[in-house]
Image (cartoon, rainbow, N blue to C red):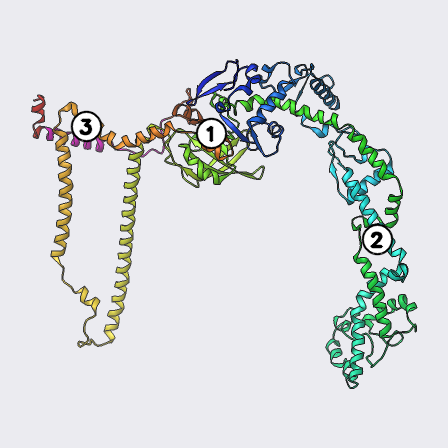
Amino acid sequence: MQNSNHIWKFSRIGGINRVTLQSGADLMHLQDLDQKLWTALSCPVKGLEIDPEVLSHMDTDKDEKIRVPEVLAAVKWILSLIKNPNDLLERRTSLPLSAINTETEEGKIMLASAKQILINLGKTDAKGISRYETSDIEKIFADTKFNGDGIITELSTADESLQNFIKDIISLIGSKTDHCGLPGISEEELKSFITECEAYSNWFLKAEEEAARIRPFGDATNDAYDLYLKIQPKIDDYFVRCKLAEFDPSSSELLNSLTSRLEAINDKNISNNNEEMLSFPISKIEANRPLSFSSPINPAWENNIISFKNIIQKSLKKEDEMTETEWYDIKAIFKNYENWLAEKEGTIIESLGLEKVREYLKSNKKEQVLDLIAQDKALEKESNNIILVDKLVSYYCHIFTLLNNFVSFSDFYSPHKKGIFQAGTLYFDQRSCDLCILVSDMSKHNIMAKNSGMYLVYFDCTSKTENEKITIVAAFTDGDVDNIEVGRNALFYDNQGQDWDATIIKIIENPISIRQAFWSPYRKMSRLISKQIEKFATAQDEKVSKSTTEGIEKAGDKSISSTDNISKPVDTATPATTSETAKAAPFDIGKFAGIFAAIGLAFGAIGTILAAIVGGFLALTWWKMPLAILGIILLISGPSMILAWLKLRKRDLAPVLDANGWAINARAKVNTVFGKTLTNLARIPKNAKINKKDPFKEKQNPIIPIIITIIIIAAAAFSLWYWGFFTKWGIF
């Protein structure tokens, strides 16, 4: 412990001396408390039953862990902003404005910001502020034009044209959410939009500057290019066929022959979109023949060819035909256009149209938006201060709860309170378990949780209302474990009262109590005997069933054999089969005599042992007999009870929390007395009335048990008289 005159108070809790935080002075000197005396050194941000904003504000490095330095920094900050440190111990639900320390500059700012929040929410006369009010950021900034986040919305200006400009940026580039909850833009979105507009305008400018090369057909170039893409393969096909006709003049007739192909579609409904017709040549094939626009053209291609010809006819020497050379020149022209299209930029904003894009670039809307963003950013400090009020209220209301579950585990060990790691209550097998913890990493639990020494049951939980799944581990610290099996169902209630269907997926077995350990050997013996009896009964049942089935089958075979023998003469020369010989084998009395002798010897040995035990027991003086019985009981149950006592002394919650990401610095023992407070067994209320008449109770005949009891007592008395124990004891 560091040098300090502060007097700390420690309490023996859970087998460990833990510091007790009971005053504001303790909090002010918390930095002087040796970290070796802290119960925890770190804890996860998620999965704890505390306002998540408290942990989020503390997690300054955003690693989803809270460590000692971050806790100390949070305590130091909140103490500097409130007048009375003792207020934190009260765990209030709201922060009174009068509690803020205005003697510091930061305190004055916090008070002003808190009042501004209340003004924005229409609660000007409020004397305090709660987390419910500080957490609703959207409502706080709902009616503000600027809020310091550097994001502007269409409501940030009354200029309709500027509003439309902002809307276009949001729809084409994207948006960010403003503090008021509306979509808006920052400098990033504005810069991206202007860049895209300039790129698109410059790309189009290249086509305008090189119009003769890139857009030779003016505004019709794009339509011509679309037509070109459709007819290019067909025209290429036409000129290739003409070259074939030139190469082999005799092939012209074959190339133009469509008789067989026309026969295939003769019975069909022919249209210009017919696939067969589209595959026909576009015009008659001849050697060195230009594509004539005046000669007959394949009806399926005629409209497209004529439309294309009307656009490019200025590039042709003759209006009614196109040579192969001219076709290659036209392809080169469209290649330039194609290359220009491939260089296209600014496609994101293309839907605005070139005219509107250039209008935006020529206007001063960029400067106007930048000015609005600058006005918004000017309030950044005030906005951050308003957000800091949420941090202040969070710490004021909840930081002492965190300290009582971090510096010490006093909440966990206090009656009627729960640790922040306790997720709810599980109901199962006529008991409720309060020590239920969310499982964040099952693989770590598989390795570490077994070291806790507790009887742990893992459940998969499903919520029908929230459509969520979680895994919890429940510690069973009281009651019996006979009916706990994987697959059984239970019901889990979280701390918000929501119910979850729970199913057992894993069990880590450890003793629950000395009483349960005492009966454990007898239960194991009972289960073993019951299992062996069931096994024997099942085997005998199967044996009888098999024997009966075989007997029926053999009887059927004999019936069939008898019928066959009526129609077939008996062959006396045929030797008997092996099975028949076996059936005819004589009864081996010697073999069975040996078996019976062995059984007799076994029973004799058992009887001798029992007689020796009974004889030895009866040879004792009467007052030693209870001691002998007690000794036998201790011999059977003693080892189990001793082992249970040793394990119960070591029962520790720390390994379970470590598996969840905590860094526990001291043991968190759960002894038998404390364990009974964590698991509550079903008990009938004190004033309840019980009807003991069970209509389904099995009928009993008391005469038989009485007769059996009398016979046992008489036999015992006769044995004592016969062996002379009554005389020895001076009874007779």
Q: Which residue is mark 2?
A: 203
Residue 699 forms part of the magenta stretch: yes
Residue 637: which quarter of the image?
A: top left
x and y, in percent, of residue 314 in the image: 92, 68
Which element carries disc 3, helix, strand or loop? helix
- What crowding class fits label 2: few (fewer than 14 Cα within 10 Å), some (14-19), or many (20 or more)? some
Q: Which residue is mark 1?
A: 435
Residue at 77% across / 41% down in the picture? Answer: 189
131 to the left or right of 577: right
Q: Which residue is mark 3?
A: 628
- Amino acid residing under circle 1: Leu
The residue closer to the viewer here, 390 or 139, is: 390
Q: Nearer the viewer, mark 3 or mark 2?
A: 2
Q: Do the residues under discs 3 and 2 have CB atoms within 8 angstroms?
A: no
Residue 335: which quarter of the image?
A: bottom right
Q: Main secondary structure of the magenta part?
A: helix
Which element carries disc 2, helix, strand or loop? helix
- Amino acid residing under circle 2: Trp
x and y, in percent, of residue 217 in the image: 89, 62
Q: Nearer the viewer, mark 1 or mark 2?
A: 2
Segment colored magenta: 692-720
Relative to 214, residue 423 above or below: above
Relative to 178, residue 339 above or below: below
105 to the left or right of 421: right
x and y, in percent, of residue 179 in the image: 73, 31
287 to the left or right of 488: right
- What crowding class fits label 1: few (fewer than 14 Cα within 10 Å), some (14-19), or many (20 or more)? many
Which element carries disc 1, helix, strand or loop? strand
x and y, in percent, of residue 121 in the image: 73, 24
- What crowding class fits label 3: few (fewer than 14 Cα within 10 Å), some (14-19), or many (20 or more)? few
